[in-house]
Image (cartoon, coloured by chain):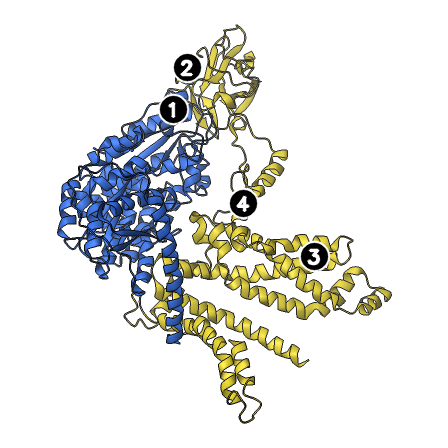
Chain colours: A yellow, B blue
Amino acid sequence: MASATAGARKAPAPRSRKSVTGTRRSVAALFLLPALVLLGALVVYPIGYSVVRSFYDQSGDGFAGIDNYKELFTDDGIRTALKNNIVWVVFAPTVTTALGLIFAVLTERVRWGTAFKLVVFMPMAISMLAAGIIFRLVYDQDPDKGVANAVWVGVHDTFAESSAFPKAHPGRESPLVARDGGFVTRQTVHTGGTVTLPLVGVAPDQMPDGAKKAVAPTADPGKITGTTWQDFTRGKGVGTLGAPDPAELGYAGMRIEAVKDGKVVASATAAGDGTFTLPAKADGARLRLPASNFKEPYNGLDWLGPSLVTPAIIGSYIWMWAGFAMVLIAAGLAGVPRELLEAARVDGATEWQVFRRVTVPLLAPVLAVVTVTLMINVLKIFDLVFIIAPGSSQDDANVLALELYRKGFSEDQPGVASAIAVFLLLLVIPVMWFNIRRLRREVRR
Amino acid sequence: MRAAATLLAGALALTLSACGGDDDNDSDSSSSPSAGAQGSGSTLNLPKLDGTSLSVAAVWTGTEQANFKKVLAEFEKRTGAKVTFVPAQDPIINFLGSKVAGGQPPDVAMLPQPGAIKQAADRGWAKPLGAEAQAELAKNYSQGWQDIGKVGGKQYGVYYKAANKSLVWYNAKVFENAGASEPKTWKDLLSTAQTVSDSGVTPFSVGGADGWTLTDWFENVYLSQAGPEKYDQLAQHKIKWTDPSVKEALTTLAQVWGKKDWIAGGPTGALQVEFPASVTQTFTGGDQPKAAMVYEGDFVQVNIADTKEKVGTGAKVFPFPAVGGTAPVVSGGDAAVVLKDSKGAQALATFLASPDAATIQAKLGGYLSPNKNVDNAAYPNDVQRRIAKSLIESGDDFRFDMSDQAPQAFGGTPGKGEWKDLQDFLKNPSDVAGTQAKLEADAAKAYGS
């Protein structure tokens, strides 16, 4: 728009009379016509029509006044979108610019600077759509697919190991009851007696390597003996309830504690065939399979869940645009007079001081341009959110441009969608005005 | 400005019609083989239409589109008309809107929802079916399938294609390992799930990232438990979502969704699994797939084809178990609607209502017809035959997908309305009352009442 008005003002300036092709004025008009028609049809007309449409109701027949704008500030979905847009505008451009600045300053000083710059700039060559699909995979919940969770789970598991029987649970008519994530016997045990602790829910392929066929416990006077095993035969079901069938495997390595009055008096670990022995002092205690046996494997962070989805998508945006910021800032940096930096260093300034007091102030105009450009870019963010956020958290990741699309094309609410469009335009105008003003000043200088 | 706009629109129309031309050639080249032999002894009377050209718009792509073109080729052969397939985008009603606005609607369009047919009829785009098409329809379709193609008592749609959304697909090897059998009732389903879980495999895979899989779950439970009358009332929002019947259905649903060890990945994990992945994770992994069963319609076969398992051997199916008295049959489908009232368009609608057309596509697979006169033997495999049989046998007791009947804002928008509310319910299945309240609030807003 700006360029069109500027062009129109300049064109008729030199006043002269006729020439071979007619008046200059008409020639100018002729040459301007294609641009004006295109701009008019593609920019001015749609904007105008959107403004008009935003005052009409859903079908487009009745005048709705400011109802659509009221909806804009009362609808929950739009409010979330507005909130997220603010988060986007605050964080995405600043972090991107900051990273770009760091990259630009650092690459000046390393030998392989150009190669590094090339790598950082590379994501710019990828379309938003492709980047969205890439990051949908990066953030996948399953650590076998998503890189982010693979790293996170890897780090976590080096510090905390998971257990062997995560899904084990008591079967029918079990002597065990669940308590505190583990299982406790209903009855107390007695010296010379035997105990069976059958559970189900562990597939044969997931048994620990040492697991052997389960053996029924044999009584031992002066001790308490028992067996804990997977009371389920593949293809047959439970079989004999509460007693090991031929093909059933023992829970090798299961920890068993004897608990009396809330205190652990003895403990044992099951052998490969599931048998264990407890000393006589466990007499009268209840046996407990503590929760540590059944800890679920750590599944990583819920990157695309309601709370993390916006930061996660902003992360992918930064990945794309940090290169753009870096290149612009590096160009600005090339224009910074070296003497000033040298002088500061000669005066005894540390590198940090040089960066903080000399480089950054000199780069301020460039930094402002980059930030503002990114702000405009971020206000209309749509594709990354649309692609990365799964349906279940699309509402939480919502931004205005996405809400516009949803209202306009899937909910058939063109009036409200137009109102959102007008609102977005209003949001962009101050930023654009700032940029144009800066540009003018630059030209005058 | 207006002139410029028209100019542009003209240019767009030009490119569009150029695309149309391309497709024309495609259908020509694929027309000649197959689909020729049968139908000679049929009673179907089609007029001679030499020199007429027709266009049909549908959202189908890939194999589905290629198969449908073979049906169109048969029509061309019998009448001499020339039929062009116009590929459309979802939602097709918006696509048609722009076509109608441009003055060039296709002659016939395949509309997926009763709501879309009603919209098309209300806006005057759709034209009522002629006498021949209606006669053919009456001969081949049960009353229920005729009625959902009606708007205000007039017949507009011919349901050419159906979907049976009351199926549970299971990994046969897991069931064998667990010694589990196909359940007939909801109680059986719960004990089967328990057995599968005892054997060490998570029973259910839920594609919670796509809200529509969850609405389909609910619809099956609700239809079987509350009965068809209540189902219709709820679909039209004549009873509220705070109704006790909804509470009962959600509570029943929570018997499955509420057990975190019964859902692959737990509820939060399931919310990030999209429908295709929910199918593939059930049929990959040998003895240890991520889940044993996945609920969805007959179109699950398409995704099973992406795995190593074969439909009928490694991947089997049973009808959704009866929660109340009878097992539910929830269906979907695409109806042919005439947009330009001409002899040719009416003849095409008549043809699509005939068993001749449906049989051609049934033989090619991946297709289900609500036409009761299609020979069950025409379907290519046992699983297809079984699905088709249960659909036809349900007679008029089937119900159309409820969320497809609801306004788009409630039943068809990702992250909104019913989709979102049921996703929240999957995350927190103990909050039945809160879910009902949210559903009712969203429904009231979308239905405008």
Give me the disc on residue A242: 2
Query: How far separated are the C-alphas under marks 3 and 1?
Result: 56 Å
Circle 3 Cα neighbour tier, 10 Å, few/some/many (<14 / 14–19 / ≥20)? many
Foreground: disc 3 or disc 2:
3
Callouts 4 and 1 in the same chain: no
Which residue carries the number 4 mark?
Answer: A139
Which callout, 4 or 2, points at the residue further toward the start of the chain? 4
Depth check: give the residue in front, B200 or B145: B145
Q: Can you name the residue that lies furthest to the bottom here?
A: A17
Foreground: disc 1 or disc 2:
1
Which residue does the image show at 50% across and 47% down from the upper left?
A304
Which residue carries the number 3 mark?
Answer: A103
- Name the secondary structure under disc 1: helix
Query: How far separated are the C-alphas under marks 4 and 3?
Result: 25 Å
Q: Vertical placement of B23 versus A238: above or below?
A: below
Which callout, 4 or 3, points at the residue further toward the start of the chain? 3
| Marks 3 and 1 close (CB-CB < 8 Å) | no
Which residue does the image show at 74% across and 55% down from the upper left?
A113
Residue B397 in view of the camera: yes
Callouts 1 and 2 in the same chain: no
Please, which chain is the residue tagged with disc 4 on? A
Query: How far separated are the C-alphas under marks 4 and 2?
Result: 44 Å
